[in-house]
Image (cartoon, grey):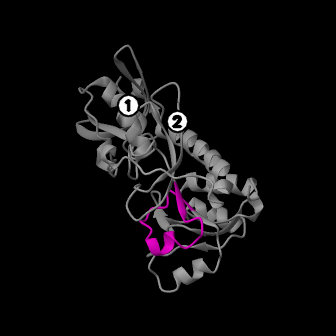
Amino acid sequence: MMIKNKIKIGFFGTPEYASYTLEKLFQEGFEISFIITMPDRPQGRNMIITPPPAKVWGLSHNVPVYQPEKLKELGLIEKLTNHNCDVFVVIAYGKIIPNSILNIPKGKSINIHGSLLPKLRGSCPIETAILNDEKNTGVTIMRMDEEMDHGPIIAQKEVIVEPWPPIADTLGKEIVKAGADLLISILPDWIEGKIKENEQDHASATYTKMIKKEDGLIDLKDNPYKNFLKIQAYNGWPSAFFFMEKDNKQIRIKITQASYKDGVLNIEKVIPEGKKEMNYADLVI
């Protein structure tokens, strides 16, 4: 088997999930040759220009970080080729990567995707699994092609989270942890060509849709379990919310914590527009 510290990885990723995977690979002795991540963006109420977590990790570990606005930037392919990587690893990067980059290394480019492909292709598999009440979810490692989540499967692992449904961050962390462990276990054999990839059943593919801020709106008169699924899936961002009349005006109420039992949705904590988090019971007095 190929020795881990002889394997050079070019890494594509952006959020905390990516920095967690980077740290696991680093701890296991793999060499991270470079990181490609999204450009710094304004974030928060004050719109402060903020680097993505993968960049923060790279700078703290003296790893070269590239943040191209477009992957067809002049000289980028030559730059990446010169790193002489064995494989490129992609997790939650945020852009479609062209074949001219995917096929640079001997081991091609492999992606950690947060579902059991071909189910839930797309950018929001974790939230969609909760929204769809799909308890049997997991992680897939696939060889990438230019189509979205379309390439052949290298390895898969089921992830079961109890109690169900969890909030998206809880499910996401479990899936990313399983994905990193699975990646570490297969990488040496993959580089040496010992693992047979399997074509996806494309006819069975399902897809996620991009989440928008307004998707968090719920009607408290709707099915209580469906509302609970939405609250759990959208916890953090975009957050489930509703409007209520207070002091003769409609205000937006963000739900931060809820529970569901015996057919009843119990809203526990909320953030009313312009205020801090509070108990829902105190709001409706």
Mark 1 or mark 2: which is in front? 2
Q: Would you call the spot at circle 1 few (<14 residues within 10 Å), some (14-19), or many (20 or more)?
A: some
Residue 55 position, x and y percent, is 60, 65
Residue 249 painted magenta: no
Task: Look at the picture and state if 75 lies above or below 281.
Answer: below
Numbered circle sitting on residue 133: 1
Q: Give the residue number, with chain letter if any, for mark 2.
A: 158
Q: Is residue 100 left or right of residue 23?
A: left
Q: Which SS class for mark 1?
A: loop
Task: Decide which of 236, 151 is in the foreground and name it.
Answer: 151
- Magenta residues span 89-111
Q: Is residue 95 visible?
A: yes
Tag shown at residue 180: none
| Outermost residue, top side | 262
Q: Amino acid at mark 1?
A: Asp
The kind of secondary structure element at disc 2 is: strand
Disc nearer the start of the sequence (1/2) = 1
Q: Quadrant of the N terminus?
A: bottom right
Q: Position of residue 88 (x, y in %)?
A: 58, 65
Picture coordinates of residue 156, whole percent (x, y): 53, 43
State the image coordinates of residue 210 (x, y, percent, origin top left). 33, 52
- Label count reads 2
- In the rendered image, the residue lying farthest to the bottom is 74
Residue drawn at point x = 72 percent, y = 70 percent: 62
Q: Is residue 241 above or below residue 149?
A: above
Residue 39 seen by the camera: no
Instruction: Name the amino acid type tagged 2.
Output: Glu
Which is nearer the eye, 178 or 4? 4
Q: Is residue 93 magenta?
A: yes
Residue shown at the point (40%, 55%) measured from the top left: 150
The image quarter in which residue 115 lies:
top left
